[in-house]
Amino acid sequence: MSNSVLTVSNETLNTMKEHYHSSIVNQSPPGSLFVAKLTGCTITAYKSGKVLFQGQDFSSEANKWGNVEKIPPGKKTTSKKTSAKSPSSKSSGGIYAPPANVSDLSIIGSDEVGTGDYFGPMTVVAAYVTSDKIQLLKELGVKDSKDLKDAQITSIAKEIIPMIPHSLLILRNEKYNELEKSGINQGKMKALLHNQAICHVFKKITDHDQVDGILIDQFCEPGVFFNYLKGKEISWKSENTYFSTKAEGIHIAVAAASIIARYAFIKEFEKLSEKAGFVLPKGAGNKVDQAAASLIRKHGEKALLEFTKIHFANTQKARKLV
Ligand code: MG
C-alpha cells in the first residue's frame, strides 16, 4: 500500500476538515477526527495532528499540505524488518513460525513487562494493528520499548492508546503471590494472561476476517504455551498463531503492545514507590535487596506480599540484611 503521513497544526487540521468536508465518510477509527474518501486517496486525520494519506494518489494529495516523506509505490514499508531473520532472533519454527511477509500483515501482537522485576506488577498487553496503520505507528516512534526511555514510552503510549484496539492486564503482586503459592508458575501466569488479553482484543474487533494472525512474543515453546491453556477458552483464530522471540522487531503490533505494557508498569511502579515512601529500584539486583530490607524495616514483612514477587531470591537476601 502506498501511503504517507503528515504532522500538521490544529489550524491546518481544521482547514483540512473544511477542504474535504464533502468527502468525509461516516467512519471514525479510534483517535481520529475524520476520514475522507476521494477517488484514489483515503485521508485519515487524527486528533494528535497526524494525517495519513493512503491510495495511489496519496502523494499528490498529501503534497497539498506540506512536505511529505515519499514512500515509492511498490516498496513496502518494511525495509527494517530483517530482524526477523537476524541470528539473535529465534523463532520456534514449523507451523508457529511467522510468515516472511508478517510485518505487512494485520496482526494482534502480545507482550509482557515486569516478569524479572522483584518490585512491581506484571503487565500484559495484546494490541491489534491493521496493515494500514503500520506506517503511522512508525511515524509516532513505535519501536522496541527496550530502546526507549521512560519519558518517550509515556508520550508514545498516550498517543497510541486511543488509536489501536488493545487489552491491558495488570497482575498486581497480591494476586501474583497467591497464584504462585497455589502452584501456578510464572510461565503459566504469562500464558493465561496473554490468552486473556488476546481474547479481549479479538472480541473488540468486528471484522475478524481482516485479522491475518496473532504474534506472541515468545517466552516458552508453543506446545508448552498451549498446554498451559488446557481447559481455557481460546476464542481467537489459533490456526494463525505465530511465536517468535524479539517479536517487537518483527511486527509493530508487538512493539506497540510492549510500549503500552511498559507504560502501565511505570505508572504502577510510581504508585508503589509513593506508597513505600522511597524510590523503588527496578530489576532484581543488590539495590533491590537493600530496598526490600528498607521496606521490611519501614512497613513490616507483610508489605512484601503487596510490593514484591515474594518467591524471588531477593526476599531471603533482604531478610538477612534486616
Ligand atoms: Mg516479551
Image: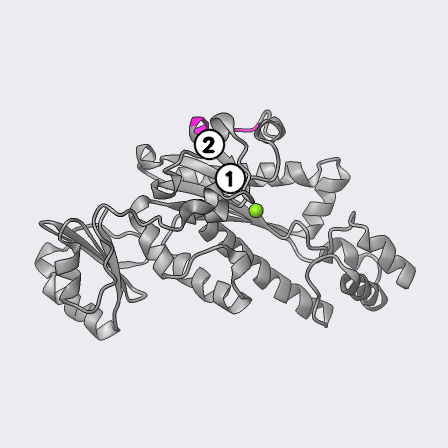
Name the quarter where the C terminus is drawn. Answer: bottom right
In this picture, which residue range is highlighted in magenta?
A: 232-239
Residue that mark 1 sits on: 216
Please give left or right for residue 67 compared with residue 123 in the image: left
x 40%, y 45%: residue:
128
Measure how far apart labels 2 and 1 are at the Cα level: 8 Å
x 36%, y 50%: residue:
79
Please give left or right for residue 179 compared with residue 166 in the image: right
Residue 280: percent from left, percent from top: 71, 66
x 59%, y 29%: residue:
229
Task: Identify the secondary structure beneath mark 1.
Answer: strand
**Between 144 and 295, which is closer to the camera in this rendering?**
144
N-term-proximal mark, 2 vs 1: 1
Residue that mark 2 sits on: 241
Task: Classify 290 as above or below 193.
Answer: below
Label 2, residues with CA under 10 Å away: few <14, some 14-19, many ≥20: many
Amino acid bearing label 2: Thr
x 32%, y 65%: residue:
48
Residue 88: percent from left, percent from top: 56, 45
Label 1, residues with CA under 10 Å away: few <14, some 14-19, many ≥20: many
**Between 132 and 157, which is closer to the camera in this rendering?**
132
Instruction: Give the main secondary structure of the magenta stretch.
Output: loop
Q: Is residue 125 magenta?
A: no
Task: Answer whether labels 2 and 1 touch (C-beta < 8 Å).
Answer: yes
Task: Classify 310 as above or below 154.
Answer: above
Amino acid bearing label 1: Ile
Residue 168: percent from left, percent from top: 51, 49
- Does residue 30 appear in this view? no
Q: Which mark is residue 103?
A: none
